[in-house]
Amino acid sequence: MVMSQKSNLFLRAATGAMVAAGLALAASGAKAQQFKWPKYFSVITPIVGSSNHSLGVAWSTTFSADTGVRVRILPTSSGYSRTEWLNTNQGRLTVYQPSDFFDQMDSVEGYAKRTAGPSDTRAMFVLAVTPWGYMVRGDSNIKTVDDITAKTKVVFYSGSTFISNGMRALLALAGVKESDANKVEVGGYGANTKVVVEGRGDVSFTSPVSGTSYAAEAAPNSIRWLAVPTGHKNFAAFRELSAGYVLSKAGSGVKTAVGTPMDHAFQSYHVRGNESADFVYQLAKWMDKNHDSYKKKFRHAPMMSMVSLKAYLDAGILEPFHDGLIRYLKEKGIWTAAHQKRNDTIVRLMKNRIEVFDGAMEAAHKAKVLTDSPNDKWKAFLADYKKKNGVTMKFSKEIEAAIK
């Protein structure tokens, strides 16, 4: 009788535990089922022919087939537009790299606008570790960076500050003043390469993974790439103008670039800071879990992986990560307290830049200074306002100083 009572008690306890576990699983399943993908969303990328445009097409077509969500790829030639279109809700994802984020926080050039200036944007997944280097034509007499002189026809594309700053960095490395440089101004990313192939320009700053570089390599004269020497006497001046990169030998892109020491950027998709954490979490999870289903659809899609994301974490992130991505990384067991501390520091610095920029916009409005475009009067007003409010160094330097 006693044994029977004990058995009954055990059975009731076990049954209760099973019911509780069942309810917990049901609740968990219900929570997972509660998320509904939007019917459609847009992804902002660089121009057609760029690596990131092709990559966007590669994963989004697989995503649409799997989920039924319609994804539109919106190409634009301007780095400023990629930020502006995100901020004005023309797309939910846009392509960034750390140098873009730094320039936005510094509100330089086309980022000195309300719609493109400092704003809360955060990384939601890494796309690639992209090499950026200095391309010359295959038959060029320019063999090293020291062959660059004031007579060299250097190509300038001002639609993205990191590209124009890349060329300024080369001039600094070669010891040539920008005011003395023989500039060839172009109006688009494609022309940035094309003018070198045609002989109208001598050297451009571009990526070996871009479709434009593959076309240039296949041209009759082909192309070559200039090595960036770390031990160069002007390397510090070079890095001052090219923050946010990791210098290493190119391992991807056109054959002529492979093995050449050049800068690499961790490129990622950014979303607005107030984007749904559930949406970001689910999309980051899909990108990771389904990598095998789209990595063969584009030659550089294998880099859009958790391997690249981990490499960025190990190198030290330079942009804030979105809470939805952080949730997924915690779930994967690869987000640490140190990562969170670094992320919190970057978020704090970002929010301060936003506050100062918004304050400058308001003060300029009261002073009747036009801020619709980065005109000289507004740029001077902004620079003075930033100085008076404690912003005295580049954003990259602020991060460096805060994280030491």
Image (tube, grey):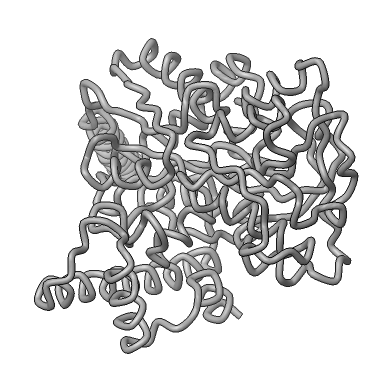
- Please give left or right for residue 82 compared with residue 178 in the image: left
On-image quarter of the N terminus = top left
From the top left corner, tell me how far across and down residue 4 is, in percent: 31, 38
Answer yes or no: is residue 191 visible. yes
Q: Eyeballing the image, is 91 above or below 55?
A: below
**Residue positioned 29% across, 18% down in the render:** 69
**Residue positioned 62% across, 49% down in the render:** 183
From the top left corner, tell me how far across and down residue 236 is, in percent: 74, 72
- Please give left or right for residue 100 compared with residue 358 in the image: right
Quarter holding residue 10: top left
On-image quarter of the C terminus = bottom right
Q: Which of these two is toward me, 133 or 69? A: 133
* Residue lying at the far top of the rendered structure: 65
From the top left corner, tell me how far across and down residue 44 is, in percent: 37, 33
Q: Eyeballing the image, is 11 above or below 218?
A: below
**Residue positioned 31% across, 74% down in the render:** 382
- Please give left or right for residue 341 compared with residue 92 in the image: right
Q: Eyeballing the image, is 180 above or below 331?
A: below
Quarter holding residue 168: bottom right
From the top left corner, tell me how far across and down residue 351 is, in percent: 32, 70
